[in-house]
Amino acid sequence: MTRALWRRLHNLGYRRDVGPGRRNHSVKPVPRLKALDQYSGEWVAVKDGVVIAHSPSSREVVRQLQRLGPDAKDAVLQRAATSTEAIALGLG
């Protein structure tokens, strides 16, 4: 198969798999936790809707999580933005 033909066939399959008809429209925004307001500008670890560690440095939060051991499993590390900061997330 020539390279040009292969590229055309590959692109057709790609467009079919990720086109507008295949998009998941049921994704809804996740509301911001009210508990993050008191940690504005800091890094926080959240597990089951509860802040379990916080610090201005992400490295320090990781150290705190390591000290917690198995209790920190499935925690999410995030930065609690101030009210004046814009946030952009990319998934992929």
Image (spheres, rainbow, N blue to C red):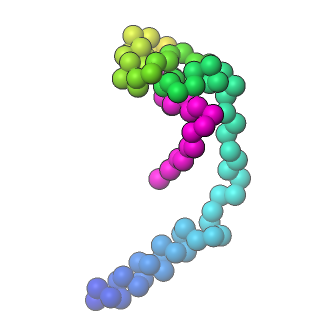
Residue drawn at 57 percent across, 21 percent down? 39
- Where residue 75 appears, x then y in whole percent? 51, 24
Compared to 7, does 53 lie above or below?
above
In the displayed orientation, state which residue is furthest to the top.
67
In the displayed orientation, state which residue is furthest to the front.
84
Is 76 contained in the magenta span?
A: yes
Which quadrant is home to the N terminus? bottom left
Between 84 and 75, the one nearer to me in the picture: 84
Residue drawn at 62 percent across, 66 percent down? 22
Between 78 and 19, the one nearer to me in the picture: 78
> For residue 17, which quarter of the picture?
bottom right
**Residue 4 horizontal side relative to residue 77, left or right:** left
- Where residue 36 appears, x then y in whole percent? 62, 24
> For residue 56, which quarter of the picture?
top left
Residue drawn at 47 percent across, 53 percent down? 92
Compared to 36, does 64 lie above or below?
above
Q: Is residue 48 visible?
A: no
Compared to 5, does 41 lie above or below?
above
**Residue 3 horizontal side relative to residue 86, left or right:** left
The tally of labels here is 0
Is 69 contained in the magenta span?
A: no
- Where residue 20 appears, x then y in whole percent? 63, 70
In the displayed orientation, state which residue is furthest to the left.
2
**Residue 70 horizontal side relative to residue 88, left or right:** left
Residue drawn at 62 percent across, 19 percent down? 38
> For residue 48, which quarter of the picture?
top right
- Where residue 85 appears, x then y in whole percent? 57, 39
- The range drawn in magenta is 73-92
Between 14 and 76, the one nearer to me in the picture: 76
Q: Is residue 80 visible?
A: yes
Secondary structure character of the magenta stretch overall? loop
